[in-house]
Amino acid sequence: MTDTIDEEITADVVASQVEFERDAHDGAIIIVEGDSDSHFFKKIIDEENCKIVIAAGKENATGAIYKLNKEDFSGVLCIVDSDFCCVGHVDIDDTNNIAMTDFHDIEILLFESPSFDKLVEGFGSKHKIASALNGDRNNLRDLIYEPGVLIGAFKLWSKINSHNLTFKKLGDKGYAFININDLSCDIQSLIRSVKHASAMQHLVDSDVEKAILEISSSDLDKRHLCCGHDICWIISRALRKLIGSHQKESVSKENIERILIIGYEKCYFLTTQLYQKILKWEAINPGYKILDNNFQK
């Protein structure tokens, strides 16, 4: 996933980058959305036989692979976030050479892995965690998911109704609508912040809140509904007071993402659907290798 989009980069530019990379490299090439995805896949791939091209966004990534497929350009796999594809909002065509993440994005995959448990072990307070969860540590992910589900429901509602609301500026105030004492979400504050950033003041707050609550209370899988960047912001706020005692700079959203990637081990990837998709791609594209030989199969 990418937080920021470089408007100068287009699908054609990405396709050209792939073609340029091929001039010096005969092996596989993967196209990913952003920098954090690139950092993650560097832990997974065989860097001698596979190169990474960063597309600066999902549309650029998929647009580039569509173009390369039409040109019968071989040895390229586009790996993108599933986003809301598994909860009713499909935004990419079903085509060859595209693999989607198991959950909403790579950050949710990291959050669901033992890497998150390592982060909590290193940065969390056992006493505070026990107090927050009434002794049941297994509910920590659910506690963090709760506000994330509300944000995800808001984003899904925006997409379904083509409102194109802007959520990127929520980080400017550090997700202040999430209470650091208990991670409760001030939905009205969230709605007002997004409306203001999107210049969509005509939306009725009560109608938006009703829609958010309806979606969030449905049986949609929270791992597909929640955005990983939101979850990392929530973890950041949790570690400041509810389950830790850290200054916001030391547990910033960026640091949380970095720590989750550092703590991720190759053996965790073996259990993912994405691993199986890459294996299948390698099998039907002989001569092109993506995965590191050090995987314990």
Image (tube, rainbow, N blue to C red):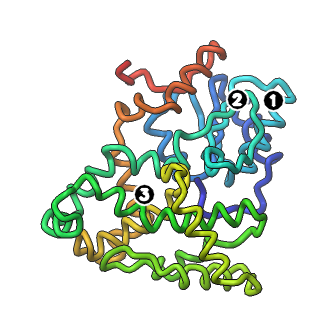
Q: Nearer the N terminus, badge 3 or badge 2?
A: 2
Residue 216 lies, in percent from the top left, at: 53, 62
- Residue picked out by circle 3: 257
Question: Toward which corner of the image does residue 124 lie, by quadrant?
Answer: bottom left
Q: Secondary structure at mark 2?
A: loop
The residue at the point 71 percent across, 79 percent down is 198
User: Up-down: is 272 above or below 207?
Assistant: above
Position of the C terminus, as image quadrant, is top left
Question: Toward which corner of the image does residue 271 lie, by quadrant?
Answer: top left
**Horizontal arrangement in the rendering, residue 15 relative to residue 70 (left or right):** left
The residue at the point 64 percent across, 32 percent down is 29
Residue 188 lies, in percent from the top left, at: 55, 84
- Residue picked out by circle 1: 69
The reply to whether the C-beta atoms of the residues labelled 1 and 2 are less than 8 Å apart is: yes
**Horizontal arrangement in the rendering, residue 36 relative to residue 202 (left or right):** left
Towards the viewer: 24 or 89: 89
Question: Toward which corner of the image does residue 157 lie, by quadrant?
Answer: bottom right
Q: Nearer the N terminus, badge 3 or badge 1?
A: 1
User: For the residues marked 3 and 2, what is the alpha-carbon distance in whole angstroms?
Assistant: 27 Å
Q: Which mark is residue 97?
A: 2
Residue that sits furthest to the right in the current view: 70
| Label 1 Cα neighbours within 10 Å, binned few <14 / some 14-19 / many ≥20 | some
User: Up-down: is 202 above or below 236?
Assistant: below
Query: Identity of the amino acid at label 3?
Result: Glu
User: Up-down: is 37 above or below 205?
Assistant: above
The reply to whether the C-beta atoms of the residues labelled 3 and 1 are less than 8 Å apart is: no
The residue at the point 63 percent across, 26 percent down is 28
Query: Identity of the amino acid at label 1?
Result: Asn
